[in-house]
Protein backbone atom coordinates (compact mmCIF):
# COMPACT_ATOMS: atom_id res chain seq x y z
CA UNK A 1 0.00 0.00 0.00
CA UNK A 2 2.82 2.38 0.86
CA UNK A 3 4.46 1.63 -2.49
CA UNK A 4 1.24 2.41 -4.36
CA UNK A 5 0.79 5.66 -2.43
CA UNK A 6 4.37 6.71 -3.16
CA UNK A 7 3.95 5.88 -6.84
CA UNK A 8 0.74 7.90 -6.94
CA UNK A 9 2.46 10.78 -5.16
CA UNK A 10 5.34 10.67 -7.61
CA UNK A 11 2.86 10.83 -10.48
CA UNK A 12 1.06 13.79 -8.93
CA UNK A 13 4.35 15.62 -8.33
CA UNK A 14 5.39 14.99 -11.93
CA UNK A 15 2.03 16.36 -13.12
CA UNK A 16 2.41 19.44 -10.94
CA UNK A 17 5.92 20.04 -12.23
CA UNK A 18 4.67 19.78 -15.81
CA UNK A 19 1.81 22.17 -15.08
CA UNK A 20 4.25 24.56 -13.42
CA UNK A 21 6.51 24.49 -16.47
CA UNK A 22 3.56 25.08 -18.79
CA UNK A 23 2.30 27.97 -16.65
CA UNK A 24 5.79 29.48 -16.51
CA UNK A 25 6.02 29.38 -20.29
CA UNK A 26 2.56 30.93 -20.60
CA UNK A 27 3.59 33.63 -18.14
CA UNK A 28 6.70 34.43 -20.17
CA UNK A 29 4.65 34.64 -23.35
CA UNK A 30 2.14 36.95 -21.68
CA UNK A 31 4.93 39.14 -20.32
CA UNK A 32 6.37 39.43 -23.83
CA UNK A 33 2.96 40.29 -25.25
CA UNK A 34 2.49 42.88 -22.53
CA UNK A 35 5.85 44.48 -23.35
CA UNK A 36 4.90 44.59 -27.03
CA UNK A 37 1.47 46.05 -26.25
CA UNK A 38 3.03 48.72 -24.03
CA UNK A 39 5.54 49.62 -26.72
CA UNK A 40 2.80 49.79 -29.36
CA UNK A 41 0.67 51.91 -27.03
CA UNK A 42 3.57 54.30 -26.48
CA UNK A 43 4.17 54.55 -30.23
CA UNK A 44 0.48 55.21 -30.85
CA UNK A 45 0.41 57.90 -28.17
CA UNK A 46 3.43 59.59 -29.71
CA UNK A 47 1.85 59.44 -33.15
CA UNK A 48 -1.38 60.90 -31.76
CA UNK A 49 0.53 63.77 -30.14
CA UNK A 50 2.38 64.48 -33.38
CA UNK A 51 -0.88 64.41 -35.32
CA UNK A 52 -2.48 66.77 -32.80
CA UNK A 53 0.44 69.18 -33.18
CA UNK A 54 0.11 69.05 -36.96
CA UNK A 55 -3.63 69.67 -36.74
CA UNK A 56 -3.10 72.61 -34.40
CA UNK A 57 -0.58 74.11 -36.79
CA UNK A 58 -2.91 73.56 -39.75
CA UNK A 59 -5.78 75.16 -37.84
CA UNK A 60 -3.67 78.20 -37.04
CA UNK A 61 -2.71 78.55 -40.70
CA UNK A 62 -6.34 78.22 -41.79
CA UNK A 63 -7.46 80.79 -39.25
CA UNK A 64 -4.79 83.19 -40.47
CA UNK A 65 -5.94 82.66 -44.06
CA UNK A 66 -9.57 83.29 -43.09
CA UNK A 67 -8.57 86.47 -41.26
CA UNK A 68 -6.57 87.69 -44.23
CA UNK A 69 -9.44 86.88 -46.59
CA UNK A 70 -11.86 88.69 -44.29
CA UNK A 71 -9.57 91.71 -44.05
CA UNK A 72 -9.19 91.91 -47.81
CA UNK A 73 -12.98 91.82 -48.24
CA UNK A 74 -13.40 94.71 -45.81
CA UNK A 75 -10.76 96.83 -47.49
Image: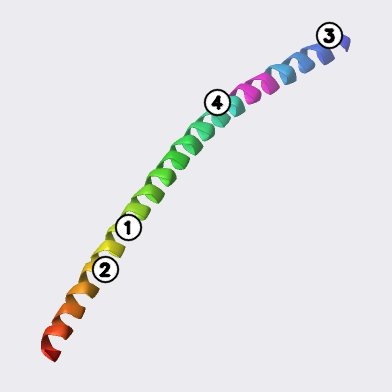
Q: Is residue 23 left or right of residue 42?
A: right
- Whichever of callouts 3 and 4 sits on the residue coming sooner in the sequence is 3
What segment is highlighted magenta in the picture? 15-21
> Which residue is at a point 88% across and 10% down the rendered structure image?
2
Q: Is residue 71 shown above or below 65?
A: below
Q: Quadrant of residue 42?
A: top left
Q: Residue 21 at x, y = what percent?
A: 61, 22
The span from disc 1 to disc 2 (Cα, nearest Å) is 11 Å
Quarter of the picture containing the N terminus is: top right
Q: Residue furthest top?
A: 3
| Towards the viewer: 11 or 75 | 75
Sort mark 3 into few (<14), some (14-19) or many (20+) by Cα contacts within 10 Å. few
The span from disc 3 to disc 4 (Cα, nearest Å) is 33 Å
Q: Quadrant of residue 55?
A: bottom left
User: Disc 1 vs disc 2: which is toward the camera?
Assistant: 2
- Whichever of callouts 3 and 1 sits on the residue coming sooner in the sequence is 3
Q: What is the number of the mark on residue 63?
A: none
- What secondary structure is marked by label 3? helix
Query: Which residue has dot 4 on it?
Result: 25
User: Disc 4 vs disc 1: which is toward the camera?
Assistant: 1
Query: Which residue has dot 2 on it?
Result: 60
The span from disc 3 to disc 1 (Cα, nearest Å) is 74 Å
Q: Residue furthest front?
A: 75
Query: Which residue has dot 1 on it?
Result: 53
Membership of 49 in magenta stretch: no
Q: Quadrant of residue 62?
A: bottom left
Label pair 1/2, CB-CB below 8 angstroms: no
- Whichever of callouts 1 and 2 sits on the residue coming sooner in the sequence is 1
| Towards the viewer: 63 or 37 | 63
Amino acid sequence: MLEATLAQLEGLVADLLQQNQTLSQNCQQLEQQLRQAREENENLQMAALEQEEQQTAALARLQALVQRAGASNVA
